[in-house]
Image (spheres, grey):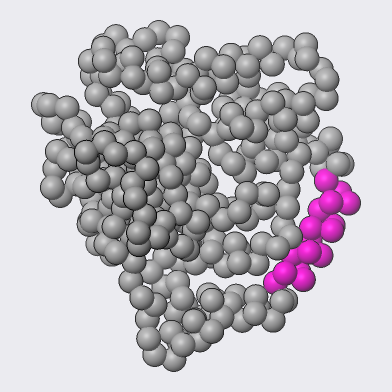
């Protein structure tokens, strides 16, 4: 069982040494395909402008069930409505822009650019630009050999590596969070994540609706594989994942949160004598969430916002 960056270590191990002696692997909140915020920062991008709505998404993601009725959420809505938040963020962005070259040269590049392990967090689509920005033509920097090796042989080839391990007898499951906003400081718009890692990267290819929206009532699953892989809340289509039958999604579950029901699910997987898929257990469908007691429950269709005076103000300032 591996979590977060631990997934990059296990992925690299499989590429280097194979899967001999490994019966089961659970990839939890995996960073093995990267993180958009790291990709943006590594290619020298940071943007706070026009992030008022995303900031509200982010705060509401953290608040969970109280979102939309909590005073803080309502206050943010009111500030967004008046334009105050956008004005403040533009001011902060102006200051960041004036200092960013210095911050990048004196801190980000020397402190993180030479850490090979953190480069595993740079998604493929960001990689070439990030290398150019970080090393500024220093193609012979010693760390580049390791950086390029992981990118070319592990990250890009990950589906092949995992497929080979599965064919060779290793059972694999992937667990990804969604319905939480990414941190609103990059050029990336608000997307589904577990607070830190983008859902599409954790799941190796899930199709996600814009955060706060749905794929649409008439949405048709992208890949017709004979099974339904669209979440009941119409937020995620798992049919486009590299391994849709072995990838679970947990709504509103933050990156390092492990509810009791989640741990029980993992115990069930590791103790199972046969291969486990998203169809094996009725109590563990592909899309789940944790209730207040920490038990896992199936994701249900999106509910209407609550009524009452707070609900009215929530709608007004949404």
The majority secondary structure of the magenta stretch comes to helix
Q: Is residue 91 left or right of residue 61?
A: right
Q: Is residue 236 visible in the rendered structure shown here?
A: yes
Q: Which residues are magenta?
A: 85-100
Q: From the viewer's side, name the closer residue of 301 and 256.
A: 301
Q: Eyeballing the image, is 302 above or below 310?
A: above
| Percent of width and height locating residue 297 | 22, 57
Q: Could you tell me which residue is drawn at 36 percent across and 10 percent down? A: 18
Q: In front: 311, or 12?
A: 311
Q: Answer left or right for 127 relative to 92.
A: left
Q: Is residue 211 above or below residue 127?
A: below
The location of residue 226, given as percent across then percent down, is 22, 38
Rendering quarter of residue 277:
top left
Compared across the picture, whether 248 is left or right of 273 comes to right
Q: Name the residue at the bottom extreme.
A: 309
Residue 78 in the image, given as x and y percentages of width and height: 61, 81
Tell me which residue sits at (70%, 40%) in the image: 41
The residue under the point 23% across, 15% down is: 169
Please tell me whether residue 88 belongs to the stretch shown in magenta: yes
* Quadrant where the N terminus is found in the figure: top left
């Amino acid at each position: 069982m591996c979590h977060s960056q631990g997934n990059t270590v296990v992925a690299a191990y499989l590429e280097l040494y194979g899967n001999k002696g490994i019966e089961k692997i659970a990839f939890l909140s995996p960073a093995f395909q990267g993180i958009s915020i790291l990709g943006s920062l590594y290619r020298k991008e940071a943007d706070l402008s026009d992030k008022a709505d995303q900031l509200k998404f982010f705060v509401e993601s953290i608040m969970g069930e109280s979102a939309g009725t909590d005073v803080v959420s309502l206050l943010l809505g009111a500030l967004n409505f008046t334009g105050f938040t956008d004005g403040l963020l533009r001011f902060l962005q102006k200051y960041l822009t004036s200092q960013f070259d210095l911050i990048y040269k004196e801190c980000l590049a020397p402190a993180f650019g030479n850490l090979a392990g953190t480069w595993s967090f740079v998604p493929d689509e960001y990689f070439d630009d990030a290398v150019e920005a970080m090393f500024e033509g220093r193609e012979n920097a010693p760390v580049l050999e390791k950086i390029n090796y992981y990118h070319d042989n592990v990250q890009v080839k990950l589906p092949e590596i995992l497929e080979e391990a599965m064919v060779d007898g290793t059972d694999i499951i992937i667990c990804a969070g969604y319905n939480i906003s990414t941190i609103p400081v990059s050029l990336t718009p608000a997307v589904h994540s577990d607070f830190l890692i983008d859902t599409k990267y954790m799941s190796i290819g899930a199709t996600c609706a814009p955060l706060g929206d749905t794929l649409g009532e008439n949405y048709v699953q992208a890949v017709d594989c004979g099974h339904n892989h669209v979440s009941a809340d119409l937020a995620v289509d798992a049919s486009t994942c590299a391994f849709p039958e072995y990838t679970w999604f947990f709504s509103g579950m933050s990156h390092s949160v492990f509810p009791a029901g989640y741990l029980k699910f993992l115990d069930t997987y590791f103790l199972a004598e046969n291969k486990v898929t998203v169809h094996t257990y009725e109590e563990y469908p592909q899309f789940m969430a944790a209730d207040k007691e920490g038990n896992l429950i199936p994701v249900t269709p999106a509910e209407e916002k609550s009524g009452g005076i707070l609900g009215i103000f929530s709608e007004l300032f949404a």
